Image: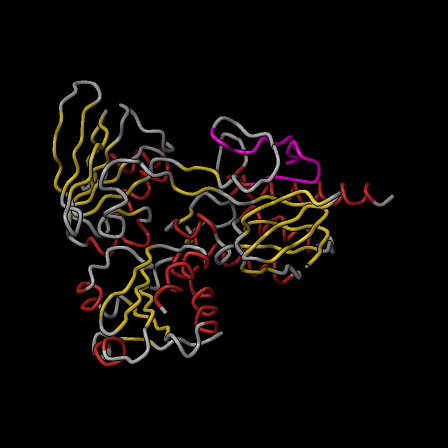
């Protein structure tokens, strides 16, 4: 069984920054990541609001730099999928791919995953026209009609991105205004290929082998319609990866972990950072700040443990 | 880091469909961030299933014919070919456990 002072669970920007700071403090630390470090940022085509990069940088390039930087200061990363976090006396125990890891403190940076819309056809046609990653799958829809569902930053940014390939992009949103940042909205409204369909929800995705159309309903008039499309990109929000704990931990109604300003959760020795944390703004820039804050708080915590 | 054989539209028939060993083919493209996430998992699988499985990659950008033939609209898509047929398919970057659960009964 491996034992470390601190284990970071999750290798997105929050976890990598916690790792960077902890490594620079010469803490005994290990980062466990279920895939390759990166997280949700890997699905972002272009990041243009992370300070210091005046030219937009691709999400995968940005996070590759973060990983390289943290590793450069000695951060160790293992590709292991943590399934459970439990208490073991005064220590925390993680079970990952059948192996056990012990630590004095844990920084939970497990992030979020896309929420499913939960309508018929969505699961059946995943990979056959239903997608959660425009960066990955956009080029398959060259000169085709696509639909994007959602109204937040991701939905609107990816709708604009898809105009590089698609003939037309219909953005279907359940309200009469978008939530995305104003500058992103302006770009969508001025893009000839983007058509916003207001006050409308998708009710069913149709297609035998591949997506052919989507049934929609106007929530104000009740009018139902069928929209022909080859692709449907879903950006209807995210859910936290927070169901790992073998003990009670304070979370908000949607399952995001509550912390104090030093990223401490309700459980001693457990810290939460990044998208999995209960907060208003989920961005790379907030994630990195929280990672640094948690690493510092953990250092103080460990010092107090051994007077 | 292991170098995976790169399959092309031209070599697909021989390397995959006519292969004696089952072949796990990763349909990927350089533009796709999550595709990078599955590479270390494929490396581990190639090691653990050595002798029972061949692992290869197919760049959909350079080889659109094969990608279209198998209806690939989302990458990464990882298809297991056994005796010339698709035995199972995994869409998206998922942890190793999901691969093992799908592959074990088939190999």
Residue positioned most to the top: A221
Residue A95: x, y in percent? 59, 52
Q: Nearer the viewer, residue B44 or A150?
A: B44
**Image point 31% across, 44% down: which residue?**
A158
A27 inside magenta stretch: no
Q: Is residue A176 above or below residue A15?
A: above
Q: Nearer the viewer, residue A47 or B34?
A: B34
**Image point 29% across, 25% down: which residue?**
A177
Residue range (magenta)? A254-273
A263 inside magenta stretch: yes
Residue A269, image quadrant: top right
Q: Main secondary structure of the magenta part?
A: loop
Residue A96: x, y in percent? 56, 54
Q: Is residue B63 shown left or right of residue A18?
A: left
**Image point 19% across, 24% down: which residue?**
A218
Residue positioned most to the front: B105
Q: Is residue A301 shown left or right of residue A267?
A: right
User: In which quadrant is the C terminus of chain A drawn?
Assistant: top right
Residue A137: x, y in percent? 28, 53
Q: How many marks?
A: 0
Q: Is residue A243 above or below residue A13?
A: above
Residue A98: x, y in percent? 56, 57
Residue positioned most to the right: A307
Residue A203, image quadrant: top left
């Amino acid at each position: 069984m491996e034992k470390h002072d601190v284990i970071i669970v999750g290798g997105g920007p929050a976890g990598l920054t916690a790792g960077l700071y902890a490594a620079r403090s010469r803490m005994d630390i290990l980062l466990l990541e279920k895939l390759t470090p990166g997280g949700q940022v890997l699905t972002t085509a272009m990041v243009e609001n992370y300070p210091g990069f005046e030219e937009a940088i691709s999400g995968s390039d940005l996070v590759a730099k973060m990983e390289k930087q943290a590793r450069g200061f000695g951060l160790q990363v293992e590709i292991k999928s943590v399934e459970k976090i439990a208490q073991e006396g005064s220590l925390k125990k993680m079970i990952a791919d059948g192996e056990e890891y012990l630590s004095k403190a844990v920084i939970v940076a497990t992030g979020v995953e896309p929420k499913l819309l939960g309508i018929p056809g969505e699961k059946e046609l995943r990979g056959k026209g239903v997608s959660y990653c425009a960066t990955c799958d956009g080029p398959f829809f060259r000169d085709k009609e696509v639909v994007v569902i959602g109204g937040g930053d991701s939905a609107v940014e990816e709708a604009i991105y898809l105009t590089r390939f698609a003939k037309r992009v219909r953005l279907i949103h359940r309200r009469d205004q978008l939530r995305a940042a104003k500058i992103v909205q302006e770009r969508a409204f001025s893009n000839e290929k983007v058509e916003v369909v207001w006050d409308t929800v998708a009710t069913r995705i149709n297609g035998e082998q591949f997506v052919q159309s989507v049934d929609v309903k106007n929530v104000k008039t009740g009018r139902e319609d069928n929209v022909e499309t080859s692709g449907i990109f879903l950006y209807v929000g995210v859910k936290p990866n927070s169901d790992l704990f073998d003990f009670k931990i304070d979370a908000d109604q949607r399952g995001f972990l509550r912390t104090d300003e030093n990223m401490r959760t309700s459980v001693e020795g457990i810290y939460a950072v990044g998208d999995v944390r209960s907060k208003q703004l989920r961005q790379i820039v907030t994630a990195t700040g929280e990672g640094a804050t948690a690493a510092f708080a953990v250092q103080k915590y460990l010092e107090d443990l051994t007077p | 880091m292991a170098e995976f054989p790169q399959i092309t539209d031209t070599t697909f028939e021989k390397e995959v469909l006519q292969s004696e060993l089952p072949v796990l083919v990763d349909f990927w493209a350089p533009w796709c961030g999550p595709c990078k996430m599955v590479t270390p998992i494929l490396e581990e699988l190639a090691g653990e299933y050595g002798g029972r499985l061949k692992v290869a990659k197919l760049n959909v950008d350079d080889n659109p014919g094969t990608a279209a033939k198998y209806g690939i609209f989302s990458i990464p898509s990882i298809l297991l070919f056994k005796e010339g047929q698709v035995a199972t398919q995994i869409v998206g970057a998922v942890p190793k456990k999901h691969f093992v659960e799908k592959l074990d009964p088939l190999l």
